Image (tube, grey):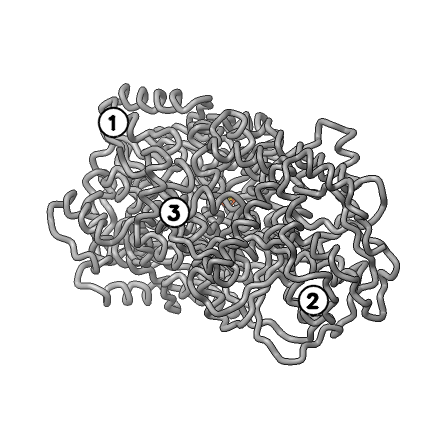
Amino acid sequence: MMALSDRTALFAEGLAAAQGELFPCTSWEDVWRYAVSLSDEAPVVSPAAYEQLQRGALPDVNDPLRSIADRAVGITEAALAVAETGSVLLIEPAPIDRAVSLLTHHLIVAVTEQDIVDELADGFRWLARQPRAAAYATFVTGPSRTADIERSLTIGVQGPSRLSVAVLA
Amino acid sequence: MSASTAPFRVRYRRSVNDPDLRPRLLAFQRSWRESRDAQVRRLEQRSEQSFDELRRNFAAVKDHTLERMDEYIAEFRANAEAAGARVIELATADQAVDYIAEVCRSRGIEVVVKSKSMVSEEIELNHELEQRGIAAIETDLGEWLLQLARERPSHLVMPAIHQKRQYVAEILGQELEREFDPDDIPAMVASAREGLRGHYLSAGAGLTGANALIAETGSVMVVTNEGNMRLATSLPDVHFVTAGIEKLIPTWADAERQLQLLPRSATAQTLSTYTTCITGAQPGKEMHIILLDNGRRAMRDHEPISDALRCIRCGACANVCPPYQVVGGHTFGHIYTGAIGLVNTTFHHSVADAAGPQGLCVSCGACETVCPVAIPLPAQILDIRRRVHESGHAPLWERAALRLWARPRVFNALMGMGALASGMARLVGLARRDHLRLPLPKRLRWRAVPTLPLRSGQTLIRARSSQPTIAPAPANGQAVDLFAQCLADRLLPSTVDAAARLIEAGGATVNLPEAQHCCGLPAFDAGDWDTARTMARQTIEALEGNTRSVVTPAPSCVISMRAHWPQLFADEPQWRDRAAAISDRVHDLAEWLDGPGHLPSGCLIKAGSDSWTAHRFCQSSNRGDDSARIDQLVERLTGEHALPLAEPEVCCGFGGLTSLAAPEVGEGILDRKLNCIADSGCDTLITNNPGCVIHLRAGAVARGSEHETLHYAEFLAAQLPKQPTSSSPPPISSLLPTLSLPPISSFLRKQEPTNNHHQ
Ligand code: SF4
């Protein structure tokens, strides 16, 4: 096991290599303040993030995906982060859990610094022990991208075009 | 007919006539190589394991799963069904299409949104569903562009890599009815959101492939970058997964092992943007997991090919493939592209579909070096070629040429005539730099035609006195059989002579076995095993009956004897043993000079300095043979260092029959090599296989390059004191034995004084 600060530094490196951004913060309050500073439109939040924040717009339960399509800023929470690859692990069993991370333009993912693991193998070990989490689990590494047209790397295709990870100390 | 479904010759002509394809794919291959190598180095450092260890470990996981396929399918099924999915095993493409169509029909589904799935390409699902009134919409940007253009993928991972941005702007413009600026790629990419959003909302089903099926929990793992797969599995109520049975792995830990190798090899990413694992149907939804056989069990049961089922569809084998760079995936492959496509097409589609591109492979072996699951692709391609040949799909001219080659007397007579004609051409000024000045058709003008020297290598050796030894000479007094190689003996006689002089300088005496001809490699390469066996038997008979070491300046013949002969005689124990007795004695010249016939370091220091660089024969080098390191040998003996050469591992394009059957491929690869050679700034290029010398020299002469092209034996032997030769120029009569018709020639051969002239 690496020291906490080393792990966070390595995570930041991996995330930057995948064109994501890290911002350190101490509370969910900071996450919220950052989110509202980004756009005039109110941030949408996933059910997991709503538990922490108790504010923001939740997707509509009956039509979660259509109700928030193309919103500017979204907030969600990761189960853990992987230092080796700069990834965050999102556990999203139902479409309502996924709506925010799928369809907003700028996605903010909050993760507790203690939950950064060394390598991908640790993340997989964690997942293998959580049958319910594995219903729909995604390691997200940076914003969505394509290089399908003349190999030119374009960030932001059908998922978010910006990804910020809020590491909660 | 679309660009990718036309007959092979039509696809071939189209791709070689596309002026943009080669430079685009060249830039792609070079940048992929650089980033992938950097990724692999980091992985090796972090894991403290070599790439080879990592890939062999994961290959062992795949092999284990394949051996117990039915057990793992049962485990996967039980777990996935417990989580609410349906698992359906199907044997053929038609059954898979029927199943999907039937589910759609019974649920009233008219639109299916698809994330990338090679299995759905394999079964041509879109087309089949369309016939039944169901729209299958591709949502991966590249796949969508292909669908709009009615094309097939030309690469496993970058499906639309052949499309130019101008073309993309045109097809997007038609679909979305507005103008696109070809230089504004972000705008074109952004249009996918707009063009596809409606389809996600109206679709009744989403279809994805699977990168792995995890048996211990019944989970499906899919790796993507765009986010479309997550949308396609979140909006519609039905989720289809189409996967080959070979995608099964036992555990999550194995999935992680696969991920260490897959994104790094595919897109040179540490991890792709989205690695999604889905276990079972989501509440209120359906999940149908289709496990397709479609030839896979037949592959598993055919030993030389079974390892191909390890494939994780990373595309790396295309990314290092020199002919792929010249013609692209619509020509180099069928639906599966790259080296793996040359192998698995026979099983998922047909021998006829696999036949066309076989002749494009130059057997350089680059694919195997990067394959993250260590599939012996080059050997498998040779096995498929044999099937192609045996099923009558090989070109007639090739069969005829090999039959002639297999008959030493005919071969010698033709070569003799060629030498006479070359002599006359020289006399009337039709030759320059040992190549003919002929008005060649445009598609052949890139390579000059070499003149045939009047005397063969063996004749040169017989005509001179032996070379003094350099002390200390560890091989002192040993007698060595020189296997000249059929091509080198006729086209590069001074190379053969130089090889003999180096052996003699190490203290051994050189013996020239009579009736030596061809090891059988050209026929083996072409899949014509019967002819290859005939040639191999001749060579065995010519070399057996003693215990002398056999040395050859041609590493390709060494590979042929060591690796191909055991395959040729697998069912003939007597011949197998006779073949093994020879291949145990055979040495590549470089191996000999570093080993038993060791020449002391610094023994060939040159007077003036010469700037040189070395092209290592790709096949030996990619197999990891030490003897390929001729640059190190030359440095050791001369004390002079080689100039750096870019892309040292890339083939020169000779590829045996490839450069004859597909001249544009030979040209394209040669051009890439000659550009690197020119950039090195060398005066002399040395290389180690006679085929490469002939090809590289003919190309250099045709483009007027200044540098000289030599076999390293000749480069080294130039430092040895010259030995007097009997007569020069040779009398025409010396050609008679080879020119005469068989009965006379065999008579004359019997009259030859000795074949052990130096003993
Ligand atoms: S054969 Fe090997 S290199 Fe080629 S796609 Fe499959 S895994 Fe990748």
The chain carrying label 2 is B
The chain carrying label 1 is B
The C terminus of chain B, quarter of image:
bottom right
Q: Are marks 3 and 1 in contact (CB under 8 Å)?
A: no
Q: Residue at image x 51%, y 58%?
A: B426
In front of the other: label 2 or label 1? 2
**Residue B495 figure quarter:** bottom right
For residue B254, say whether it is visible: yes
Q: Amino acid at mark 1?
A: Glu
- Between discs 2 and 3, the one toward the N terminus: 3
**Residue B24 figure quarter:** bottom left
Residue B647 rendering spot, x and y as whole percentages: 50, 62
- Between discs 3 and 1, the one toward the N terminus: 1
In front of the other: label 2 or label 3? 2
User: Mark number for residue B130?
Assistant: 1
Residue B460 rendering spot, x and y as whole percentages: 69, 57
Disc 2 marks which residue? B717
Q: Residue at image x 30%, y 54%?
A: B20
In front of the other: label 3 or label 1? 3
* Label 3: which secondary element: helix
Q: Is mark 3 within 8 Å of ligand 1?
A: no
Give the CA distance from mark 2 to mark 1: 68 Å
Taking depth in this image into account, of B685 and B580 the one nearest to the observer is: B685
Give the CA distance from mark 3 to mark 1: 30 Å
